[in-house]
């Protein structure tokens, strides 16, 4: 399955499971009521994006805990938590029509041109 298909599926599952209900309801009502200017609506939209990013970040915290417990491939293990992180990010990309697959390819090509450790210590 291509990454872009995974992104669509991750987002569809998240929508089906209600992860976008409140955000969509709030954003629809805000846009219809015309009480806020576009800049304010964008500010609120960004808070929802930040919420999803932090959910992705929380999965990395779970990944570290799994590693500390030596759970690599088991239930709630390192690999599963990394997968959860990807799923959150793919859902976010799918929900906002970000072309994540293309950006990953583009960034990977760019990284090939960069210096050792990108000029940093690690
Ligand atoms: Mg998890």
Image: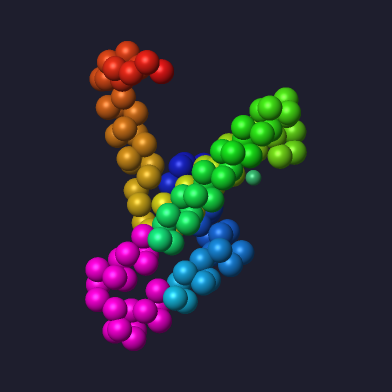
Q: Quadrant of residue 32?
A: bottom left
In the picture shown, does residue 114 fall above or below 64?
above
* Magenta stretch, residue numbers: 27-46
Residue drawn at the location 29% of the way across and 78% of the way down = 36
Split into quadrants, the picture shows ligand 1 in the one at top right
State yes or no: residue 97 in magenta. Answer: no
Residue 70 appears in the picture as rendered: yes
Query: Left or right: 4 with respect to 68?
Result: left
Residue drawn at the location 36% of the way across and 36% of the way down = 104
In the picture shown, does residue 92 fall above or below 16?
above
Q: Nearer the viewer, residue 39 or 15?
A: 39
Residue projecting furthest to the bottom: 33
Residue drawn at the location 26% of the way across and 20% of the way down = 113
| Residue 111 percent location from the top left of the image | 31, 24
Residue drawn at the location 54% of the way across and 51% of the way down = 55
| Residue 15 percent location from the top left of the image | 54, 64
| Residue 107 percent location from the top left of the image | 31, 32
Query: Left or right: 72 with respect to 42?
Result: right
State yes or no: residue 42 in magenta. Answer: yes
Q: How many marks?
A: 0
Query: Left or right: 33 with respect to 80?
Result: left
Q: In this figure, which colouring scheme has been used for the structure?
A: rainbow
Residue 83 appears in the picture as rendered: no
| Image quadrant containing the C terminus | top left
| Residue 37 percent location from the top left of the image | 24, 76
Q: Quadrant of residue 16?
A: bottom right
SS assignment for the magenta stretch, majority: helix
């Amino acid at each position: 399955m291509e990454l872009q298909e995974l992104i669509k599926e991750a987002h569809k599952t998240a929508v089906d499971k209600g992860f976008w209900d409140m955000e969509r309801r709030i954003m629809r009502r805000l846009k219809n009521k015309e009480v806020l200017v576009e800049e304010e609506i964008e500010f609120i939209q960004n808070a929802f994006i930040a919420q999803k990013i932090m959910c992705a970040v929380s999965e990395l915290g779970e990944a570290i805990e799994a590693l500390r417990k030596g759970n690599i491939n088991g239930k709630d293990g390192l690999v599963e938590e990394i997968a959860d992180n990807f799923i959150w990010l793919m859902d976010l990309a799918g929900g906002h029509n970000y072309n994540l697959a293309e950006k990953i390819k583009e960034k990977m090509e760019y990284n090939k041109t960069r210096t050792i450790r990108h000029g940093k210590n690690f």
